[in-house]
Amino acid sequence: MKVLLVGVGGVGEAISVIAKSKPWVEQIVLADYSLDRTKEVQAKLGDAARFPAEFVDASQQKMIEELANKYQVDIIMNACDPLYNVPIFDAAYNTGKNYMDLAMTLSEPHPEDPFNQCGVKLGDYQFERARLWEEKGLLCIAGLGVEPGMADVFARYAQDYLFDEVEEIGVRDGANIEVRGYEFAPNFSIWTTIEECLNPPVIWEKGRGWFTTAPFSEPEVFEFPEGIGKLEVVNVEHEEVLLVPRWVKTKRVTFKYGLGDQFINVLKTLHMLGLDNKEPIKVKGVMVAPRDVVAACLPDPAHLGDHMFGKTCAGTWVKGVKDGKPRQVYIYQVSDNEECMQKWGCQAVVAQTAFNAVIGWDLLEHGVWKGAGVLGSEAFDPVPFMNKMADYGFPYGIKEMKIIEASPVAE
């Protein structure tokens, strides 16, 4: 398999490091706006021929197409911020390449009623073009990171193997990771974090479809496994809510994230000051997007690994009925930062995201997953994916849950 990897930030680096040991990965073209960054990752990988470094402006579709044709790649892997999804997605279609991303095309809030009605939903641009991709025999796997991606695989697995009837699916994400030496240092792209946390969260309900609510709404306490413990989680806009109901039968889907009061307050302050704005404004004669300034002022998540301590947990809580009895489970993956740094030289959050994409390549390369059109990971058989997780160093767990004070906790 030959891959054009567009975006060599923290996740792009982790994808390359994890894929390096796979002999069926013939070549990964490291393409990024920062050629210095591609050279840094190339040096870490130690094989310039197998991992060539290229400059690319991901906003320029033609540049992406030229690289895809130059290297005759089999798939274009989008590891950029989702701001650039449209040109990368369209470049794959124009060049006849399969495509995979970690997050779908961006949403736009409803202009009149943003906290009740959906405007443009996450992934609408891609799903509107699904038939064209299918007719051309091309495959887009949308959102194959940890969340979305692995969490969606877990949802499909729960439906197929753990329940007779699924009532509710809730993706729940939490961590006890601390970043020492910084007052505020997100361990993932701040650009993406602002986008998903300040947009109106989406909820799906059977009979009602997709609708929105206010940011950080419906707080609940969720008990995460392996020592992370109880955390308050809140509604956040995320792709699983747009993907899962297309292939998994349930009555409700949500996504909730354990952000913490400090993080939420910082995001609210950025919004209040207009620093979350992604549209350029003129500052002393220079056009600059406030959100880009915020990102530039914060430490690069790709280089935070040595300052991070703790674990991160991603998973899918499922409520339903099995053999006539109520059942609730949490299917999850926990990554320890120290272990990820020792094994991969990458911090836990980006490594936990990256391995899923490489498993996806593996299943495509060996004909286990196949198809055409625009598909989420829940459209495929979940068992081959889950069987490979431990082999890749990221085993999953399953915990039976019970309800205490209206919040799910582990037994």
Image (spheres, grey):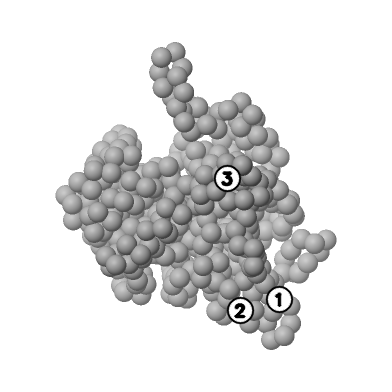
Query: Residues at badges 1 and 3 in contact (C-beta under 8 Å)?
Result: no
Q: Residue at x 72, y 57 (%)?
A: 222
- Residue toward you, 263 or 302: 263
Q: Earlier in the sequence, mark 1 or mark 2?
A: 2
Residue found at the far left of this picture? 70
Q: Residue 263's quadrant in the figure?
A: top right
Question: Number of labelled discs?
Answer: 3
Q: Amino acid at mark 3?
A: His
Q: Earlier in the sequence, mark 2 or mark 3?
A: 3
- Residue 278 is labelled as none
Q: Earlier in the sequence, mark 1 or mark 3?
A: 3
**Residue 12 percent coordinates (x, y):** 38, 48
Q: Amino acid at mark 2?
A: Leu
Residue 10 appears left or right of 226: left
- Residue toward you, 89 or 21: 89
The answer to whether one can see residue 40 in this image is no
**Residue 22 percent coordinates (x, y):** 31, 63
**Residue 194 percent coordinates (x, y):** 55, 39
* Quadrant in which the C terminus appears: bottom right
Residue found at the far top of this picture? 284
Q: Residue at x 54, y 65 (%)?
A: 244
Residue that numbered label 1 is attached to: 327
Residue that numbered label 2 is attached to: 162
Cα distance between the residues tagged 1 and 3? 36 Å
Q: Residue at x 51, y 62 (%)?
A: 243
Label 1 residue SS? strand
Residue that numbered label 3 is attached to: 110
Cα distance between the residues tagged 2 and 3? 37 Å
Q: Amino acid at mark 1?
A: Arg
Label 2 residue SS? helix
**Residue 144 percent coordinates (x, y):** 44, 59
